[in-house]
Image: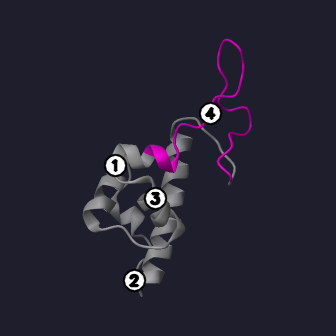
């Protein structure tokens, strides 16, 4: 039961982070690389790095990088208070992160 919960939350976290990036003009592939020339420096036209990573989310939420990585890998589910912090940072409802969880 806990494994199923963790895996579903992981799916929802990945979607929420991808949507957050998109809202800010970053389009990335599954490996997190910026694609379609969406983010280029206005003066030199070089691709800008993707600032919205799991590491960024860890800093913004005050949770360790490895802990966030475990959430995204579906190895363990976050506690409700942590899920609420993550939802706030990603500007989604906690219901979005729990979508599909029984």
Where in the figure is residue 82, as x and y percent of width and height?
30, 60
Cα distance in 3D space between marks 1 and 3: 13 Å
The local crowd at label 2, few if under 14, some if 14 to 19, many if 20 or more residues have their Cα within 10 Å, is few
- Please tell me which residue lies in front, 40 or 69: 69
Q: Residue furthest left?
A: 81
Cα distance in 3D space between marks 2 and 4: 37 Å
> SS at mark 2?
loop
Q: Which residue is mark 1?
A: 61
Q: Residue furthest top?
A: 43
Q: Which residue is mark 4?
A: 49
Q: Main secondary structure of the magenta part?
A: loop
Q: Which residues are magenta?
A: 31-56
Name the mark nearer the viewer: 2 or 4: 4
Cα distance in 3D space between marks 3 and 2: 26 Å
Q: Which residue is mark 3?
A: 66
Name the mark nearer the viewer: 2 or 1: 1
The local crowd at label 1, few if under 14, some if 14 to 19, many if 20 or more residues have their Cα within 10 Å, is some
Cα distance in 3D space between marks 2 and 1: 25 Å
Residue 28 is inside the magenta segment? no
Say how many tags the image has: 4
Where in the figure is residue 11, as x and y percent of width and height?
53, 67
């Amino acid at each position: 039961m806990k494994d199923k919960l963790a895996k579903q939350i992981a799916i929802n976290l990945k979607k929420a982070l991808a949507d957050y990036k998109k809202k800010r003009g970053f389009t990335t592939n599954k490996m997190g690389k910026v694609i379609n020339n969406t983010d280029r420096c206005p003066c030199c036209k070089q691709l800008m790095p993707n600032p919205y990573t799991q590491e960024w989310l860890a800093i913004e939420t005050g949770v360790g990088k490895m802990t966030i990585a475990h959430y995204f890998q579906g190895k363990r589910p976050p506690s409700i208070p942590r899920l609420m912090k993550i939802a706030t940072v990603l500007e989604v409802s906690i219901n979005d992160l729990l979508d599909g969880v029984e």
